[in-house]
Amino acid sequence: MSSTISPLALPFPDLPPVAGVTLRVARARYKTWDRCDLTYAELSPGTVTAGVLTQSRCPSPEVEWCRKALTLGQARALVVNAGNSNAFTGSRGRAAVEAIAARAARHLGCQPSDVFVASTGVIGVPLPIDKAEAGLDAAFTAEPCDWRAATETIGTTDTFPKAATTAAIVDGRRVTLVGIIKGSGMIAPDMATMLGFVFTDAAVEPAFLQAALAAANAASFSCITVDGDTSTSDTVLAFATGAAGTAPLTEDSDGADAFRAALADLCRQLALLVVRDGEGATKLIEVQITGAESDRSAHRVAMSIANSPLVKTAIAGEDANWGRVVMAVGKAGEPAERDKLSIRFGNTQVAREGLAVEGFDEAPVATHLKGQEIEIGADLGLGEGSATVWTCDLTHGYISINADYRS
Amino acid sequence: MSSTISPLALPFPDLPPVAGVTLRVARARYKTWDRCDLTYAELSPGTVTAGVLTQSRCPSPEVEWCRKALTLGQARALVVNAGNSNAFTGSRGRAAVEAIAARAARHLGCQPSDVFVASTGVIGVPLPIDKAEAGLDAAFTAEPCDWRAATETIGTTDTFPKAATTAAIVDGRRVTLVGIIKGSGMIAPDMATMLGFVFTDAAVEPAFLQAALAAANAASFSCITVDGDTSTSDTVLAFATGAAGTAPLTEDSDGADAFRAALADLCRQLALLVVRDGEGATKLIEVQITGAESDRSAHRVAMSIANSPLVKTAIAGEDANWGRVVMAVGKAGEPAERDKLSIRFGNTQVAREGLAVEGFDEAPVATHLKGQEIEIGADLGLGEGSATVWTCDLTHGYISINADYRS
């Protein structure tokens, strides 16, 4: 964890245990630091899994491993390494992932494909197998730990630990969902650059869990951006232990909608926490597009605004520079007509149908921009498509963090 | 002009006159500043024109005016306003452009469509017609000025005046080309955010001038990026007065290749000057992609690297962080295979076929990164496609300029 906490940080929430999930952490010493950097989550037999993974064409071997293992839909363990992403390390990187999976499988008496692995940190240095194995052995015999310790252990440049919880009534019983997440830079479209893990004691059929996670992802992790940079290691995995004793959920179950909604809510909470920890962030920006030709088009326009360095620096400067919003709408490459475009900051319309609103009240705009949560709205006036995405401002803090970072 | 000159600035070149072009500048006082901010170039009768304009869906009325006037292919005057882009100003903005064109046409006894107008500056404030007309009247009676005065007058946040020249032998005679350009922020793919004007005394058929300019643009202005933000006002216009007395060039003329090459060279010089004046830039970065499936694919991968905040901050920090280059290749959405990817900084291979080069010599890399001109090479190992693009590093200077800019 970094020493300077984001001004947008939220306190760590109270999190209930999730039956069937046992967490342990250990020191693998992937870097010369005195902190736990290996997280080991043991999952009860019968745990079902689903996942969404980076769309990078140069994914880490962990991502390739998970993509393959996900086709089987079951899990007994999750191992997360912090400090070394193991990406772009060729056969040596693959060997490290295989060694970790084999060792955990031997410990649990399961198949290596039941073991999921994720790593985050520097690219290009093979994960040292000896450190991983020693760390894993230490984790096997460590005392179980709480969510907070696990969340802190998966973090790297994060400035605060990020987790959330929710619940749903399924099959007449309350099921719990808890998610932990890390990430603050290299956060981008398609999927946020981060590692996120969701655990629930609900019983869920793999196909439904995958569909529900994909839908939740589309409205959460795929709607955030810090810097437009997509990592080689993006991973979100969901694990359903079934320990609540409910009947396995399918899309036709009575509780399907409730579970879907709870999972979507949880992912949205987690995604917003990542933006709140965006490198150098001082303001959380919500971009709302309406009136686009389609939802997909609206999403692209929203991302064009959310990724614009000029919009993000204007918000950092508390400057109601709606001209830069016009620019970002215009460059998105999506249908837009200047003379139908309206823009607002907070609740104040500043431009309507291609023109500045004459004499709009600047006081509420100035007050809104001085706050920590900024809303930019743009109505394209063309159709019914809408989208909401989240980003943060671009500040000197981002430059300091990334121009001084040691590779 | 800004007071802090870019460390990458080049001295203003010696520029020859171009027969048929007369430059004048005046104070329209679009902002409360004591400088000339209106440039008026009078072009001799018979001048042929071509142009490339922003692909923004929210273009300024100037861009719309030029797009329409370009269909006729002839020009008698160019008027450039600095300090107010007149973009997103609806019918009032259109009226201002029409008023300027009408006034210059009356002065010259030509059609309004022979008058080209470009404006740069704040978005959303209609260009004041009274100031434009008074400024234009002052320009009509001003003494002719030199290239440097005109170049300084079209500038806004530029830190140094940017111009270039070249020549070609056409039809047995030497023809001269001179270009002036402004722009340092909002510089992005598709076309750089800037106003650029090329003048030549060659005689050129409109269709050939347009084709030659489009080709030159594809390898110059479309290959630079400062911040990935595309302006609503991007404009490059070429004017061929024919005053050299050569036969009008067509694509079948003997001199066609020489003219094409000279125009391409000039545009490349101008484009690189814009990157050298990139907001906050301390290093000029050339990204060379080889081995892509196609040139188009290579261009997209190159732009993904050139627009990556993480790559640009790493270069600012003189950090050989090739992992971020891998990330940027991976996120480009183009065909790429990790295990065929090789990366170099300067002449030093740092990664080859998906792996760090063991024990590569770090000294020449460190020396290269300490310089002002940085070369990043990536070979995708897939095909014959290649592309080169230019960008600059991302520094505290960019944030200072853009978070403090007053809208």
Image: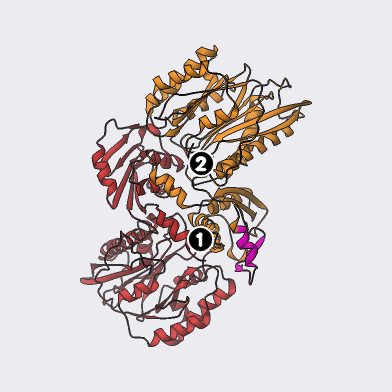
Chain colours: A red, B orange
Provide residue B131's location: percent of width, then percent of height: 41, 22
Query: Residue beneath label 2, please?
Result: B184
Q: Which residues are magenta?
A: B346-368
The quadrant in which residue B359 appears is bottom right
Tell whether position B362 is magenta.
Answer: yes
Query: Judging from the image, what secondary structure is the residue with disc 1 in?
Result: loop
Tell whether position B213 is magenta.
Answer: no
Q: On residue A14, which mark appears?
A: none
Q: Note whether residue B341 is visible.
A: no
Q: Chain of mark 1?
A: A
Please name the amino acid that badge 1 sits on.
Ser
Query: Judging from the image, what secondary structure is the residue with disc 2 in?
Result: loop
Query: Residue beneath label 1, please?
Result: A56
Q: State the separation of the CA atoms marked 2 and 1.
A: 31 Å
Q: Note whether residue B257 is visible.
A: yes
Provide residue A87's location: percent of width, then percent of height: 52, 68
Q: Chain of mark 2?
A: B
Q: Is residue A207 left or right of residue B353?
A: left
Q: Nearer the viewer, residue B107 or A139?
A: B107
Q: How many labels were placed on the picture?
A: 2
Position of residue B73 relative to residue B257, above or below, is above
Provide residue B396's location: percent of width, then percent of height: 45, 52
User: Image point 42% across, 42% down: which residue?
Assistant: A328
Q: Nearer the viewer, residue B15 or B385?
A: B15
The quadrant in which residue A360 appears is top left
User: Image point 35% across, 47% down: which residue?
Assistant: A315
Position of residue B348 relative to residue A346, above or below, is below
Q: Is residue B307 left or right of residue A249?
A: right
Q: Is residue B13 left or right of residue B245?
A: left
